[in-house]
Amino acid sequence: MTWLTPLAGVILFCATVPPLVALYFLKLRRASRPIASTLLWKRSLEDIRANAPFQRLRFNILLFLQLLVLALLAFALAQPQVDAGLRRGGKTVLLIDNSASMNATDVDAERAARSRDGSGDGSGARAENQKTRLDLAKELAIAKVEKLFAGGIFGGGSGEVMVIAFAERADVCCPFSDSRAQIIDAIRRIEPTDGRTKIGEALALARAFTMTTDAKGEFAGAEPAALELFSDGRIEDLGEQALRGDEALRYTMMGSPDADNAGVVALAAERSPDSPDRIQVFAGLGTGNASSVTTDVQLSVDGNVVRITPEPVVIPAATTSAGGTTTSGREQVVFTPIDQPREAVIEVAIPRADDLAVDNAAALTVPPARRLRVALVGAEGFVIRSLLEGMALEGLVQLSPEEFEASWTAGGADAYDVFVLQNYTPSEGKTLPPGRYLSFAGVPLKSLNAFGEHERSRVKNSRDEHPAFRFVNLDDLFVSRAQAISPLREYDVLAESADGPLIVALDQGGIRMIHVAFDPLESNWPFLRAFVNFVPNALEWLGAAGEALALAGLEPGETASFRIPANAANLALLLPDGSSTPITVRDPGQFSWGPIRRAGIYALSWDEPGREGRQTRRFAANLLSVAEGRIVPLEKLTLGEKEVVGARGTKNARSALWPALLGLALLMVLIEWWVYQRRTAG
Amino acid sequence: MPPTTFSNKPPIMKRPERVDELIDGRLMARLGQIDIVSRKIFAGKVQGERRSKRRGVSVEFADYRPYVHGDDLRFVDWNIYGRLDRLFLKVFLEEEDLSLVIVVDASPSMRWGNPDKFVFAQRLAMSLGYVGLVNHNRVSIASYGSTANGGGLQRISNMRGRRRTSEMGQWLIRQDPTPNPKTDPKAGDPSTAVGFDDAMRTIALSRQGRGVMIILSDFLFKQGYEKGLRYLAGGGYDVFAMQILSPEEIDPAANGVSGDLKLVDVEDADVSEVTVTPALLKSYRDRLNAYCGQMRDFCVRRGITHVLVDTAVDIDELIMDYLRKRGLLR
């Protein structure tokens, strides 16, 4: 229970009760009775007087009723509220989940049922105006703030409220403020996202804002804040979080326990190396429902349905282990290859209406079928050249270092997808331009900080998950002589020996490079199958920069980043909701935009000198998350050793008690009057 | 005037105006069969029906004793002188009368309760006095504490024989505990009222012979009862202190005592404001029990018999049953 204006109640109580009691002392009329002797009565009074100074006030029903009326009035004036949950006078942090699962529309069961029954459009899309969990969470949060700031005649300290919206990342919508309008405006401005749910950053932010520092700027302690969480509890990093001893978290659970959802949780599209015109599409479906879901799955290319599963796909029900861990039901779908030589948007959709629409479809942009143009720079090397000649390339050109450097000014760097540098070090005063490079030995970039040589090195550690290391085993690699490099932190070390890095990668400032710090001929690598796999992998990773991203797909919360022509101008991005936003490019030739908030198809368009019309590149962002698609709200959150049970918030529940208290006080006045009448009548 | 009580219940006992209202014929008939008993054998002034410690003139031989100069030669046993040539006196147990003194407390506090404590005391004194009269005891009755009849210690002394019954009854009827002048303007001169201590002192000093003394009072004296009783202890009387309390005093809760009250002492107008609660009633009961217990203890140590009497009991039953068991009557 909280008190909006406790001071007013205390003042009323203190101002009225003592005078009333004093009046009773003064006005108490006692019936005079003669008695044989007061001897024994006086002694009896002495016995109990010490223990009961207000003995004379006992059993006076009128005084009792009048005190009760005053107490009720004082309580009413203090404006008590139950279930307000907000601690007055202190700091309160509203943590509002705006992740993808909060877009579920199961907050109004009746409307949801009606929509499900009438779902005849087959698209699985929900009505635009349907209320989501986030809408309800915002309403509840605003209601809480209004309760908190509902002033009385004495006002009272309302404390400070901070608003944090969190999904993949956390945003401080409103730092600690005591302005009701500012807080409510901040809550209203929270927008839905299609990101995953991670609360760690939000908690860290809340703690950072509650931390206080002394005059010297050093940590002086943290004022505990009441945390108000509005979420469905489906938080990915919940297991990594723990509440501190002085932190109190109140969890308002959003969503219905019988929420229904099935979605696309995985999507991949590949062009066959043998016939690049054909695209093979794989999709994974999942559901968090307690019962299995039967649905058709359809494949669209540029908005036209081209495939539909011949039989409805049955997604098995989610299972819950004895330990309480829920595993979503999963099912795989493989479509027969489609002919699509041009760039296309591939979309897999479940034509089924459920409570969460965002994961009912997933899309990918598949770039046009094309092969790489590779330039080999440096000394004529038999091993690498023969390997490149064996690959299906658009073209392979041998350039001398001078020719290579001369082409920079003529803009010829854009004529090739990847440069393979063999023992290349730029001439004095020259710097490698933006581009994609696979470099062996040499010092193409000064930031590698080469300082000598190592001998007889073996790989001790490697990033096997990197795409360049697909089917690459470096265990047998022996390097007789390698560069000693000390790359900056921007470099990603892919393989290292006990002496230092052997293979590093860089993706910064338009330069995408894999640098091998030794000449393959100084090692046994050319004789290993790993080398034969590494070079094509590296070329594919480098050459497909941008396109590879499109193929892999983006997720909400990530940043879209890919190459565009260096002379591209007037960039504009078309968002999934149909709105367009201008884009300013800071690095010529590189487009970066993010974080992506909503899932869907994005289209980047620009003007390019020498080419007619707007150039367009599309990319897709998908919610491919099993966890986020499991939208049944979690009843209980475990944060470290603390367990927080969720409460269902209802905005319309009136928690103010003063009307009831006033009514009770009126009733007491009536009873007091009745008793008084009976007494005086008797 | 109705009896002064806590409650408004009708009076159980009417104030007597005639002797037959003090004692009825049926009770008189029953009382004629019993007698006052003294635990001691007292010496009386005249021959009575009671055995005396004094050897004297009677037909009941008690002992011999050597003759000393001055003895009455009529009681010399000449037969023994003839045989032993020594003078011996025959000593007889002398039968003598008993002095019965009844002291009635007529202070205003006795005019209280339902049944009224003073009416009860009047009837009890009448009954006991009647027993003394019919048994040829020397009956004296005294009252103190009242301003009526000129105040002072009122008494009627040395009555003997059944014919004095009416006189004794009339005297008792005339006694009236007047209220304290502080509370009742119709009261007489308060200086004429004799307190318990003074009354007991006067009675002890003016003792005529030995006998049984019965004090009828509530013994609720703020100055204490100890000093007065101490005058009587060892003074040749077999003292019975009969403490008369009304039911309202013994159990106020059961007799309508409740609420916020201003209790006014009828004797000294002392005021005590009370709010009657269970705790207060319990404390009162504890205090009453302690008071009576202390008095009983005080009396036992001094050879006084303490008898607590509730005015609600029937006088017949009290006399014929209870007092006989306590050894006052036989």
Image (spheres, rainbow, N blue to C red):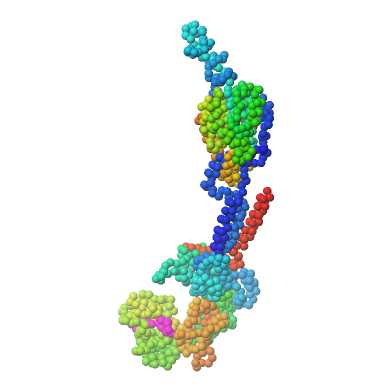
Left or right of B287, for residue B134:
right
- Image point (36%, 84%), residue name: A446
Residue A55: percent from left, percent from top: 56, 48
Magenta range: A505-526
Asked whether B277 or B50 is in front, the reply is B50
Asked whether A372 or A556 is in front, the reply is A556
Asked whether A52 or A600 is in front, the reply is A52
Q: How many marks?
A: 0
Q: Is residue A466 visible?
A: yes
- Image point (51%, 74%), residue name: A173
Residue A260 is drawn in which quadrant?
A: bottom right
Residue A181 is drawn in which quadrant?
A: bottom right
Q: Is residue A323 visible?
A: no
Residue A409: percent from left, percent from top: 41, 92
Left or right of A438, for residue B252:
right
- Image point (59%, 68%), residue name: A651
**Image quarter of the N terminus of chain A:** bottom right
Query: Compared with residue B274, is residue A371 higher up or lower down, i.e. above or below?
Result: below
Query: Compared with residue A422, is residue B101 higher up or lower down, i.e. above or below?
Result: above
In magenta segment, residue B315: no
- Image point (41%, 76%), residue name: A463
Asked whether B211 or B159 is in front, the reply is B159
Query: Compared with residue A567, is residue A316 higher up or lower down, i.e. above or below?
Result: above
In magenta segment, residue A508: yes
Residue B43: percent from left, percent from top: 54, 21
